[in-house]
Structures are given as C-alpha cells and as structure tokens.
Image (spheres, grey):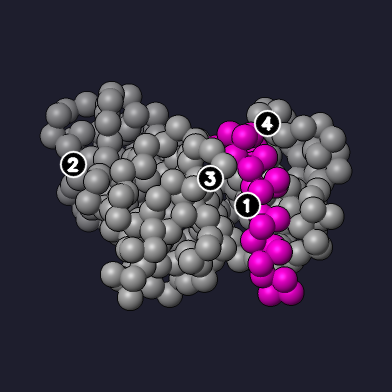
Amino acid sequence: MKPEDLEFVAALARNRTGMVLRGDKAFFIENRLGSLARREGLPSVPALIQRLKSEPDEALARGVAEALTIGETAFFRDRTTFERLAEDILPDLAAARGDKGLRIWCAGCSTGQEVYSLLMLIEENQARLGGVKAEILATDLSERALEKAQSGVYTQFEVQRGLPIRLLIRYFDKIDDTWRASAGLRQLPRWAPLNLTDDLRALRGFDVILCRNVLSHFDITVRSRVMEQMAMALAPDGCLVLGADEAASFPDAFEPARGGAGLYSRNPAFARAAA
C-alpha cells in the first residue's frame, strides 16, 4: 500500500472520528477494510481508497470510518470492573436515587457484549440493588455494530469469551449454531448511533458512563474535549468507567474514584468552572 494511501485513510479516520491510527497502519487498514472492499465489488483495499479519492462518496467514506472504529469487546471484559459495579458503585447510586432509578450510558458499545453483560449483572443483583430500574443508552459510531448489538445474536466463539455458562443458559436462546439474547434483554436498552466527537450537550444526568477502551484511540485534543463533555453529562456523584488499563490524563474533568483502576468521579472544581 502506498504511503500516500495510508495517510489518506489516517486523515479520514482522524477527521471523522478523532481516531489516531498507530502501529502497523498498512496491516490494520487491510484487515479492517478488506470486507468493505469486497462488498463494494472492488478487488483490493487500494482500489477502495482510489475510488474514495477520485469519486467522493459520503456513504462510502462513512463506511470506511465505521469499519476502522469497530472495537474489540467481550462479555464481562475486565471482570474486576463488573465486580466493583455490582458490589459498590451501583448499590450506592441505587440507594441514593430510590424510585428514580438509574440512568446509564454505554458509549462506544460496539457489538453489544458490554451492554448485555451490564443488563445481566443488574438482573442478577436485584436484591442488592433494591429492585432498582435502570435506563440504559447504548451508542456507537458504527451502525453495523449497532445492528449486531440490537439483534443480540452471537457465535459460539463470542459467547465463550467471558460469558459464564449459567448466564448463557438463563439469558440466551440457542438458534442453530448461534446464541440470541432473550427478548427481555434485547428490548431494555435504547440503541442509537452517535459520534463522540459531536456536540454532546443534549446528554445529561447519567449516573454511570461506561466508555471503555475507546478514548485511548483519540488524539489528545479530541480526547480532552470528549472528556469535558462527558463530565457535564455525568451526575455530580456519578461514576465514569474507563478500561482498566486505559491511561487517563484528564486532570481537569475527572479524578480517580475509589474502587479500582479505570473508575473516575467528576472533578467538583471543573464542574464549578464549567457552570
């Protein structure tokens, strides 16, 4: 792949999603765009890039951006994080909210494993949570990823990655060689396409925001802007959940919260300054 093609795709990703391509760009781009090139009837990824250069196509450019951003995910990824949610974070917030219930935002939810993990966790811990109701917004840039998430259909390989057999049997139905989340789970979240680099001011009052292993792909300027918007979307006593190994260099908007790596609370000083 030509260097100028690599830079063209890198610029497209950065401008549309804030994502910075690192490492072996050629391998990553070939891996992510190969199936899209085939769907478009093109012989190769370079041919796909050439079409974008010669014939600007908004739908195709959006498809490229989405293909580059579909993230790695799994059921109950970073199990310690889910333990903290079940044992400390959600019970404390549920007690504080009472009948109002909880509002949770899964940002960058990809193909939905995190969302279903959270729904099962809430259902399995109803006694601890006082029977709380939870409203969940699940968003992602990729509409293809959201379609899969909303369908709730996963392969045997996908469910074997982190999903305990007891929960698989209780909450999923076997359909041929796949497993489908029960209708009771699928109908609970509100799924919506959303680019985190857009204006997020309409989103407010969330008790928990999960944005795991997403922000580390952004450049520092975009990352800081997104974090500031998320700080305003989070309730004053709410919790931001990042990836357990995700570096957080956001000293103004958030500060580390009790309970383990990847957990953050809103910085009161930032909130006052932004008000």
Q: Quadrant of the C terminus?
A: bottom left
Whole-angstrom CA distance, mark 1 to mark 3, is: 9 Å
112 horizontally vs 69: left or right = right
Q: How many marks?
A: 4
First reached walking from the N terminus: tag 1 or tag 3: 1
User: Label 1 neighbourhood size at 10 Å, few (<14), some (14-19), many (20+)?
Assistant: many
The answer to whether the residues at label 1 and label 3 have Cβ atoms under 8 Å apart is no
| Residue 183 visible, this orientation | no
- Judging depth in this view, the residue of 18 and 151 nearest the camera is 18
* Residue situated in front as seen by the camera: 238 or 22: 238
Q: What x and y, as percent, mark residue 216?
A: 35, 40
**Which of the two discs, 2 and 1, labels the residue nearer the N terminus?**
2
- Is residue 212 within the magenta segment? no
- Picture quadrant where residue 41 is located: top left
Dot 4: element: loop
Q: Which mark is residue 89?
A: 1
Disc 1 element:
helix
The circle on residue 162 is 4
- Between the residue at mark 3 and the residue at mark 4, the CA separation in whole angstroms equals 25 Å
Q: Nearer the viewer, mark 2 or mark 3?
A: 3
Q: Which residue is mark 3?
A: 258
Residue positioned 57% across, 63% down in the render: 207
Q: Amino acid at mark 1?
A: Ile
